[in-house]
Amino acid sequence: MSRTTHAPLRRRYRTVLAAAVLAAAGLTAAAGPAAANPQADSPAGHDVLPRPPIKQPEIDPLTGHAIDTNPAADPPLKPGSGLHEGKPAFVDVAVATVWTDSSSPRKVDQPALANPVRLDEWNANLKDTEVRRGLTGKTQTQALYGDEVRILSLTKDWAKVAVRSQSDPGAKHGYEGWMPRAQLVGNPDFGKLRGAGELAVVEAVKTAVSDAPGGKAMKTVSTNTALPVLTGSDDAVRVRLPNGTTGWVKTSDVRLQAPGAGATKPKPTDLTATAKQYEGIRYLWAGTSQYGFDCSGFTYAVYRSHGIDIPRDSGPQSKAGTSVKSSQLQPGDLIFFANRGGKGTVHHVGMYLGGGKMIHAPNASKNVEIVDWKKWDRAGQFAGAKRYL
């Protein structure tokens, strides 16, 4: 990757749950976190506190890996437990699809409803273009492992949610839709850590969450997954999981993000390098992960990788940012297309790479691809461009 990382953090052992950080977050070592405030950001001034002494884990002399000497985690929370209307919950599967209605899934979509979710099997079921295109209108978006949602209403097996990290005009708490209850868990302790502690943000296209450094993979998570850091070393980081247990991720696959801090502001070439990593990934209506992207989910994910929040859909994306003329395009700018010769409703977006090239997720029959954008726009639907840097 060409992204800037926090190199000093990778060169030393660290833990973020030392007493000073816990106290600033309203936690105690014995009692654990207090109830989470779903709307709260990191405590004011938290990111400027002096760094506490760093706990260095014991190292296995044979493997060179950190030895996990922390107390055993609590028993895992049951999927679907702790859910209450009006309260936050967290995604408990690698990628959760948000459906238009609880009746939207088809028989071929059943692997996407499970916990653990079976995304490779689901993608295999969607191999046929028409079956994949059949998702149009049935799904709204996707949320990643550990993402926060707000529970709007509950039925026996389903929850209507709002995805906090994805803005949508008119939706107060974020992008709305339905998820299986079994793919969520209510865990205020996890929410407090996620809001006030250091985060391991996945920068690789995907990475494994393992039971030990270099150990057995428990699940594979997508780029942009963000999990609270407990401790770590040069080769592995121990993270808290939504169900209250812990796991390990490769240090080389994540960016360590200090409490209250964002990612380093990217250069235009950083954005395009990230976008190119996803070339060849299959189009998926409502997709926002390495298992599939729709057009605006693709651009949203690229910007999110660099700590920049933009609207989830192409229409709102076209109304934010700074307008630029087609003659002034720079790498990283977003290019929009609309019906009625570019005067109608925006229906597509791609990212400008430079040299007249655009990378985009075009439709259900194709993968993320690079094209000459003017040649691709044979119908003359160019509707403008926006810059977010």
Image (tube, helix red, strand yellow):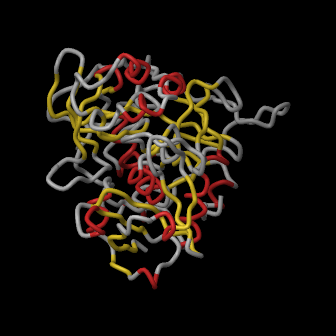
Q: Residue furthest front?
A: 379
Position in image of residue 310 (x %, y %): 34, 61
Q: Along the line of sight, which residue is nearer the eye, 381 or 39? A: 381
* Quadrant location of the C terminus in the rendered image: bottom left
Q: Along the line of sight, which residue is nearer the eye, 184 or 81? A: 184
Q: Along the line of sight, which residue is nearer the eye, 44 or 152? A: 152
Q: Quadrant of residue 110?
A: top left
* Quadrant location of the N terminus in the rendered image: bottom right
Can I make out residue 126 in this image?
yes
Position in image of residue 118 (x %, y %): 49, 22
Position in image of residue 329 (x %, y %): 47, 79
Can I make out residue 200 in this image?
no
**Residue plotted at (31% across, 45% down):** 26
**Residue plotted at (70% across, 36% down):** 66
- Placement of 385 over or under 295, stated as above or below: below
Position in image of residue 273 (x %, y %): 61, 62
**Residue plotted at (64% across, 29% down):** 68
